[in-house]
Structures are given as C-alpha cells and as structure tokens.
Image (cartoon, grey):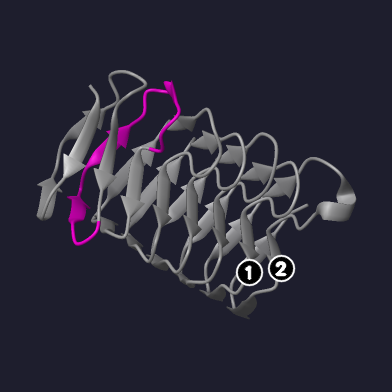
Amino acid sequence: YGCIIVEGDVTISGGTIERGDNSAYFLIGEGDSLTLDGVTVDGSSISSSSSMFTVNSGTLKLQNNSTVQNCVKSGSDGGAVYVYNNGALTIENTTIQNCSASSYGGAIYMEDGVTATIKLSTIQDCSVSSSRGGAICMENGGTLTVENTTINGCSATSYGGAVYLDDGVTATITSGTFSENKTTGISLYGGGFIYNRASTLTIEGGSFLNNS
C-alpha cells in the first residue's frame, strides 16, 4: 500500500507484487535504479492516478520473464510506466499486457530526453481511451530502440494505435511482429500501428499484419 520509494540500486528477483490500493506505485528518482528480474507485477485492475512505475531521471529495468499487467491509470501518461527528465528504461524478455491510461501511452509514456530499449518482449492488449499511442507514447526528444518485439492488439482513439512519436524523438524498430493494432476514432488522425510527427523513424524488417 502507498508509494514505494526506490533509493540506490535495488533488484527484486522472482515472486509476484500486487497493487493493494490506488495509492500503490514505485517512484524512482535521479541516480536511483530498480531492476525486476523474473517478477510479476499485477495492478489488479485498480484505477490509480499514478503509473505503476514513475521514473524521474532514474533507471528502470524489466527483464528475464518479468510480467507487468492489469495496470489502470485514471489520468494520462502511461498506464504501467512513466519515464521523464532524461530517465532510462530497458525492457527485455518481458510481457506488458492489459494496461491502460486515459491518454498518451496505454502501457508506456516517455518524455524529455528518455533513453529506452525494448527487445525480445511483448506488449499486448493495451489502450488509451481518449488519445494517442495505445502501447507507447514518446515525446520531447529521446531515443527509442525496439528490437524483435511483438506489439499486438493495442488501440487508441487517434494518432497511433500502438506507437506515437513526437517532437524530436529518434526511433529505430527492427524485426518483430506488429499486428491487430488500431485507431478507433477519426480516420484523419490514424496510423493503425504508428504515428510519427516531427521525429526520425527507421524501420528495418518486421511483420505488420492487420493494423487499421
């Protein structure tokens, strides 16, 4: 229950962490880091005003068959993960599923110079109910690398059913499978899989199936 403040370098290995009430989340500040190694984090579908992980200039690593699921954010900006102010995010061999926010990144929201790497992972069935980036939203600079990852069944009302990039982001997507993602609102603001605005995007290989 309540906010868990991470200080120093913390690693949690194995087990399950469940959100007990709507005030429960991890806060990772400047110079601090949290690594989850083979951990399941379940938001219990409890609506919260906080992302499950809030990273302000710190570092978050999810790895080795970790799972983050059922995280619901009542406000905008990342149902599961919110990283900002030059923070760092690494996701490897991890599943993020059934997470949502009202807008801007159903699973992950990043802004202001974040460095993020997502590889050998799955993001599925994540959504925003009123705006952009059903899985991932990244804005205001930063670097995003997505490698050999599956993004499936994510949705937004506009601007990228799965991914939205804006304001100077540099993104590279290599291989992977991206399927059944969609925008559900005005077709003018579409991009079933991705919407790229004022950013640099490189796509190398991959399968894109039934995005709409």
- Identity, as a three-letter code, of the amino acid under mark 1: Asp
Give the answer, above or below, for where 158 lies relative to 191.
above
Secondary element under disc 2, as helix, strand or loop, is: strand
Q: Quadrant of residue 128?
A: top right
Q: Which residue is mark 1?
A: 167
Secondary element under disc 1, as helix, strand or loop, is: loop
Name the spot of residue 85 as percent of width and height, x first: 39, 61
Q: Nearer the viewer, residue 56 or 69?
A: 56
- Identity, as a three-letter code, of the amino acid under mark 2: Arg
Q: Is residue 3 left or right of residue 212?
A: left
How packed is label 1: few (under 14 Cα within 10 Å), some, or many (20 or more)?
some
- Tag on residue 5? none
Q: Is residue 32 left or right of residue 71?
A: left
Where does the N terminus fall, quadrant-wise? Answer: top left
Q: Nearer the viewer, residue 88 or 99?
A: 88
Label pair 1/2, CB-CB below 8 angstroms: yes
Q: Earlier in the sequence, mark 1 or mark 2?
A: 1
Q: Is residue 90 left or right of residue 183?
A: left
Give the answer, above or below, for where 50 lies relative to 189.
above
Q: Which residue is mark 2?
A: 197
Residue 14 forms part of the magenta stretch: no
Residue bounds of the magenta highlight = 30-51
How packed is label 2: few (under 14 Cα within 10 Å), some, or many (20 or more)?
some
Q: Quadrant of residue 190?
A: bottom right
Give the answer, above or below, for where 33 lies relative to 126.
below
Name the spot of residue 41 as percent of width and height, x first: 29, 36
Residue at (59% x, 47% y) in the render: 104
Q: Is residue 192 left or right of residue 80?
A: right
Q: Marks 1 and 2, Cα distance to the nearest angstrom?
A: 7 Å
